[in-house]
Amino acid sequence: MADALLKEIGQKFGSSRPRTNLEDEILLDVDGKNYSAVCLFLHKRLDSPVMSLFAVDERKKNGHFGVHCVFLDTAVKRWVIVRLPVKPDKARFPSLAGAIHSAGLFEREIFEMFGLKADASPDERRLRLHDETWPAGYFPLRKDFAAPKTAGQTGKDYQFMKIEGEGVFEVPVGPVHAGIIGPGHFRFSVAGEPIINLEIRLGFTHRGVEKLFESKDIPSGLRLAECVAGDSAFGHGTAFASAVEKIRGVRVSDSDLRLRAVFLELERICNHAGDIGGMALDVGFSFPSAMASLLKESIHDLNERLTGSRYLKNANRIGGVSCGWDRPRTALLLERLDEAGKNLNRIESILTSSVSFMDRLDGTGILRTRTARDLGVLGLAGRAAGIAVDMRKIFPGVYGPAGFEPVVLQKGDAYCRLQARIREIRQSSMLIHNLVSGVKDQRPIAASDSPGRNGTPRPGRGLACAEGWRGPVLYWVDLGPSGTIDRCKITDPSFRNWEGLSFAVLGNIVPDFPVCNKSFDLSYPGNDL
């Protein structure tokens, strides 16, 4: 089917010059005349949202910028990347957002980071470089960027969508919140009690992460990847390491691939347990929340005993994992998982037997399948709304023999997202039992022993993905001739899923927002980068 797709594209768009790139990538070079048509064709033909859309400053290499639009071909397990050159003197490219909604946020990001304008874009507002603090005319991901000496303003105020009419009120919440959650501004429009619009403004924790990757060596890049979103350290590290391994042709042993999958599942269990407790706490049900906190803490403690880090940091290396493995570790892992399963059963029994708890979640925060598909919502939030996309199924690797099948529900409400977490914890435990049986005893690996550390640097570009606990984490890495990172594009699942939350709350009341929010549990730093 891959060849059929290439042939069909070649026949429809002769100038697109389709060609295979790496083992699971197809690269299409197009011109401005065909860009929109090719992307729309792939969007419909592959039934794929825009998985990522980003720019690269290639002016020193070939005299132009490059815009890359990524789609997922699930049928043949490949990425399809459409590449468009953009002349610096024009700094414009055709907008996709009018026809493909999932492209909209990416186009806004490209404009503020590179100064490349998407023609006829339905929304040109900034995402992260807030008008109140960031002056106009500075585009930080250009190679010739010089930071402004002082903070400044564009002279424009952020334009929130106005819902007007008799009895319509705006309720602003944040960006500073009670508790330890990250900063985000939520502006509700209400008519009486029901929410008729929610607009979310983020970017308050923007750290310039993609700029920080530039010129870093690979070990430093891996450590930085683990700091993008602290609760997804292993997921981000795995995606980055996999991209580098693909570019350099580094082979990872079956045991190390199994251990990576085990750690990804432990990260999933830990965070799902925390979210179950958070949803209980947000409706005032403190006892099961405390039990869930104990379950989460038991996995954090297990992580530290297995790898030396509660958050699984430094467990990844290019070419494998750094920690050793032996039979006592396997025994400890399986014992702790069995204990966690019993505690999960108790928590679920308490929650589902409470009429008041069920009343607060059942039918609350519904994200409809069509809406989720249009927005490009993926990961757990998408699967709870009927979208059966999971990278562990599309690119199975060691997950195939372990018997993985995605957990997919249909209703898309807060209770479905709770149930999806409970079922995924049980499934993760089953997967770990199956995966760890094939792991061989091994000694710890030092950074100096990593296959990616030594040898001749190999330049190149590659895209890789890990199914994190929120959803797919994508890393596109461009390695220069010296082996350092020239460009790293990160797509965290929170970036696309925040819009899903803004639609899920419609028709609900403001007091139900906390449980809706926690049922998605999206990352502020993962979104803001």
Image (spheres, grey):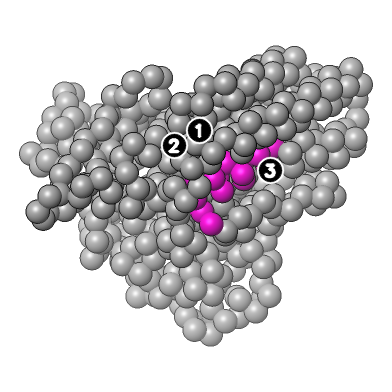
Label 3 sits on what residue type? Answer: Arg
Q: Position of residue 186 (x, y in %)?
A: 28, 38
Give me the residue at 68% from left, 75% from top.
1
Secondary structure, mark 1, is: helix
The image quadrant that residue 310 belongs to is top right
> Which residue is at 24% across, 61% downward?
122
- CB within 8 Å, label 1 to label 2: yes
Report crowding for label 2: few under 14, some 14 to 19, many 20 or more residues within 10 A (C-alpha).
Answer: many
First of labels 2, 3 by sequence position? 3
Q: Which kind of residue does numbered mark 2 sit on?
A: Val
Give the class, few, some or many, for how many residues have Cα within 10 Å of label 1's Cα (few <14, many ≥20).
many
- Of callouts 1 and 2, which one flags the residue occurring earlier in the amino acid sequence? 1
Residue at point 91% right, 30% down?
Answer: 440
Q: What is the quadrant of residue 523 in the picture?
A: top left
Q: Nearer the viewer, residue 265 or 421?
A: 421
Position of 505 compared to 133: left or right?
right
Q: Secondary structure at mark 3?
A: helix
Asked if marks 1 and 3 touch (Cβ < 8 Å), the reply is no
Q: Is residue 40 above or below residue 276?
A: below
Relative to 35, is 513 above or below?
above
The residue wearing badge 2 is 515
Q: Nearer the viewer, residue 302 or 324?
A: 302
Q: Which mark is residue 492?
A: none
Could you tell me how far apart the alpha carbons at marks 1 and 2 are, in whole angstroms?
Answer: 6 Å
Whole-percent x, y for residue 388 in the image: 62, 58
Q: Indicate yes or no whether the magenta region holds residue 413.
A: yes
The residue identified by callout 1 is 279
Q: Name the residue beneath numbered marker 3.
A: 423
Range of the magenta residues? 411-425
